[in-house]
Image (cartoon, helix red, strand yellow):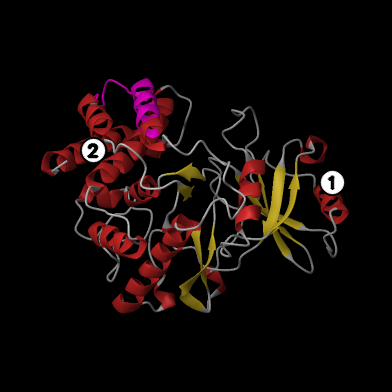
Amino acid sequence: MSKSLIDSAGAVRAGEELDLAKVSAYLRAQGLSLDGEPVLTQFPGGASNLTYQLTYANCDLILRRPPFGHIAKSAHDVVREARIMKALRPVYPVVPVIHAICEDLAVIGAPFYVMERLVGVIPRRELPPELGLDAPRTRQLCLNVIDQLIALHTLDPQAAGLGDLGKGEGYVARQVEGWSQRFRAARTEDVGDFESVMKWLADKQPAKEVAIRLIHNDFRFDNVVLDPQDPMKVIGVLDWEMATLGDPMMDLGSSLAYWVQADDDPFMQGSRRQPTNAPGMLTRQEVIDYYGQKTGWSVANFDFYEVYGLFRLMGIVQQIYKRFKEGNARNPVFATFGPFAHYLGQRCEQIMARSSL
């Protein structure tokens, strides 16, 4: 397989360098056997935690740290993320191995953790043709990815030692109220108020959670790693910074908000970040039905979770758009986020109109 398909790091952004001598000394003190001095590269992105690759003569490692500058205490808690991954690994083996968790600010000025580098393909907007996936193989890949979400949702959090990770019960009500507050605070005059959507979510929310399980909260194709030798096999699930205890149906609803299928309208197609429209991929309804069949949980009232997922994404998008309008976010792409937030609100209203809830 072409090396270009393997997810790889590039040049370190100015001002985001690390003190490699201190990092190496710390890692060796933790018992890691490292040959020579590392080459430092950085992965693109970094709106949340920053991700680097340390290339030693005998191994490649991944380092994650919070962004530079002031951040909210809980927003980028890398130590929490690493501890979740470390606890999960024995019962959910697609989590990368954690080698070190550092809370000593004297090393690089911020907490960080170091994990193994998974060498593989991360499926982004398009499936690379070199993978040779026809429609039946693409369908199987899709099922394999969903199976990883189901495996996570059917784990016993207590067995992983993560029974105290979040508040658990009352999760649905907290999310509906929290995202409603965040949307109202971020709303700009050029985006509808969508009070009807927030009232519907408050009125139609289930009396209790389907279950309290470990949820990922950002489960998408671009957070999974595929085996380069067998691209239908998932070898990694990444980005655990928002994981908590909650309702697994809410997690599925959140994931499906990003699931753009082949027959979606052009506006939705324009937002696509993963290859869910490829021939062979399941539709959103097929995902819901498959999930219900495999977990045994009823998906009869899934309209609520689908609207919640779209509304949550609308809140995320609107928060970014408000920062852009106020001059605190400069990426010109963000200019489209206001219209997109409004569109997501209209999608919510369409589902509400046809819902039997």
Relative to 102, residue 40 above or below: below
Q: Of 22 and 141, which appears nearest the observer?
A: 141
Which is nearer the N-term, disc 1 or disc 2?
1
Q: Of 329 and 143, which appears nearest the observer?
A: 143
Region rendered in magenta = 175-193
Disc 2 marks which residue?
343
Say which residue appears at 62% left-offset and 50% top-offset.
161
Task: Report the side of 85 relative to 328 (left or right).
Answer: right
Relative to 330, residue 32 above or below: below
Say which residue appears at 62% left-offset and 60% top-offset.
89
x then y, percent, for residue 148: 45, 63
Q: Residues within 10 Å of mark 2 (few under 14, many from 20)?
A: some
x then y, percent, for residue 98: 69, 56
Quarter containing the C terminus:
top left
At mark 2, the secondary structure is helix
Residue 76, by quadrant, is top right
Disc 1 marks which residue?
22
x then y, percent, for residue 9: 61, 57
Per the picture, the main secondary structure of the magenta-coloured stretch is: helix
Q: Of 11 and 279, which appears nearest the observer?
A: 279
Which amino acid is tagged 2?
Tyr
The stretch drawn in magenta includes residue 165: no
Task: Report the side of 138 relative to 103 (left or right).
Answer: left
Relative to 88, residue 77 above or below: above
Q: Which mark is residue 58?
A: none
Residue 69, by quadrant, is top right
x then y, percent, for residue 340: 28, 38
Which amino acid is tagged 1?
Lys
Is the C-beta separation of discs 1 and 2 under 8 Å? no
Say which residue appears at 22% left-offset and 39% top-offset.
348
Distance from Cα at disc 1 to Cα at disc 2: 48 Å
Task: Report the side of 57 relative to 48 (left or right).
Answer: right
